[in-house]
Amino acid sequence: MQYENPVLPGFHPDPTICRADGTFYLATSSFEYVPGVPLYRSENLADWEPIGHALTRESQLSVHDAGASAGIYAPTLRHHDGTFYLVTTNVSGDGHFVVTADDPAGVRASGASAGSEDDRIESSSEWSDPTWVDAPGIDPDLFFEGDTCYFTYHSGDPENPIRQAELDVETGELGDAHTIWTGFRDPYVEAPHIYERDGTYYLILAEGGTHAGHMVVAARADDPTGPYEGCPDNPVLTHWGRPREDIRATGHADFVQDGNGEWWLVCLGIRQVGPWPRFHHLGRETFLAPVSWEDGWPVVNGGDPITAEMDGPLPGERRTGETALERTDTTFADGLGVEWQFRRHPDHERYETGPEGLRLHGGPETLDEPGATFVGRRQTAFDCRAEATLAFDPGAGEEAGLAVVADDRHQYQVGVTRHDGRREALVRLRIGDATEVVGRAPVGATTDLTVTADAETYRFLADGEELGSAATRYVATEVTAGFTGVVLGPYATGRGTTCETAAAVERFVYESRASPDRR
């Protein structure tokens, strides 16, 4: 059955997957974004539905002081004896922790105070507060066998990189740790996951960094504690050595078995664009590939590279009419949907949703600074359009609009402000240390602000008139050196003071345009 990669396009790195009662569940890293750890479910591994986030409360997640690409790294999601377990690391906080739920959908924020902890619609359960685990490093894994849980992690020590200890998941208490893997080629090996198949234990890891040299390696043992022998055909997956291919940097994999006995891999990868040197700006995305077994070792996609168009024995039928086209038309009358996220913890009083749309109250911070009033959604296609209908009567210095954000130092804005006493739209580009306004035009009380994109260029319009453009290259990871991808959404700022006037986003439209290569 045919399916398209990536199965989760846009900023969805470090995927982790499990299966419970015939349904697949998947989580990814979220870094400084709030809520933390987005969650998805699927019946066929190719069509994924967002169901919420695991970390929705400050008692679970603190990223107030997180820098760009800091915060939450590399979760592992598992289901054991009727309970879902998620273990991850807050590199800007207290390190490793475990949260649990009976239902991974947890809760969603709703209503008048967008993202407020006090206004929630509860499902059958909510993810628990953290149980902290005192260990160094990142990329923790949980493997359950009977009453024993094994905690395996990247220690940060290049001489003893992959360590393991028994974990009491109720208390977070660890037993004595020992080293189980020192690397195939790379002493900074990371992302360990353990599985059992036919009485043999498999250790799947990532090496080579998280860019061009990324790879998946495999090892096996007769006991989950080791000793592990490496696969003679390592790496079992890599796109290293293919610099001009569209898909690169495949790695950080997790395995799952479906109800038909077939095995699958999810991993991160990037889609490169542009002339040489190529680049990527959507972030690291989630890819899917079938796994077979030869001589007791995993073989990914028959030994061939992962491609955009794939064939495999999917465990369920594709949704009818499935295409690469996505369109959402949001009025915010029912609050912020699950696709929206904040950069670090928001001041909830600055965001109101209701019949008039999304009302933003700008603070003194600009998008260059933590705490800025901004809420966004992932850019999931190279060819796309985002449009916001903005009702705003700015005072002196006040501004609101639509932003393309990679991080604090790399972003583009098309906004409405007041200049020389008149209301006008402007386009501002921030690339590293340089900031420039590249276009201006007078506008009325209500303005349609639009960003259109193709693989190499963003174009910025106000009421249909193009005011400026910018290259996608300058918000790409190769420039920002970050771990996230582009996020699009509305912002407001007083540029040094608190806005007296709220900006009303009456409508927000996001649309990706289908094409054969999913661009």
Image (spheres, rainbow, N blue to C red):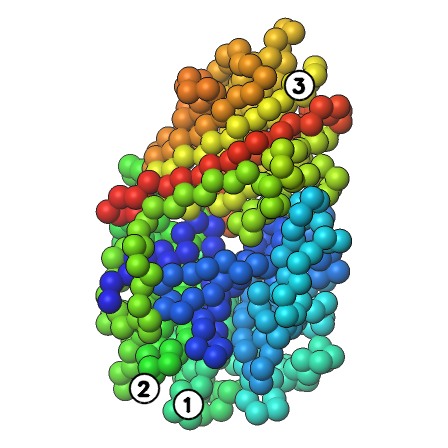
Spatial separation of the CA atoms under disc 3 and disc 1: 66 Å
Total marks placed: 3
Above-or-below relation of 255 to 491 = below
Mark 2 or 1 closer to N-term? 1
Mark 2 or 3 closer to N-term? 2
Towards the viewer: 298 or 358:
358
Q: Please tell me whether mark 1 sits on a helix, a strand or a loop.
A: strand
Q: Is residue 114 left or right of residue 507?
A: right
Q: Please tell me whether mark 2 sits on a helix, a strand or a loop.
A: loop
Q: Amino acid at mark 3?
A: Pro
Q: Is residue 147 left or right of residue 448?
A: right
Location of mark 3 (residue): 394
Locate residue 475, reporting x and y percent: 47, 37
Q: Is residue 241 visible?
A: no
Q: Is residue 104 left or right of residue 1?
A: right
Residue located at (55% from left, 14% from top): 444
Location of mark 1 (residue): 200
Spatial separation of the CA atoms under disc 2 and disc 3: 66 Å
Above-or-below relation of 224 to 193 = below
Image marks 2 and 3: residues in contact by CB distance under 8 Å: no
Image marks 2 and 1: residues in contact by CB distance under 8 Å: yes
Q: Amino acid at mark 2?
A: Gly
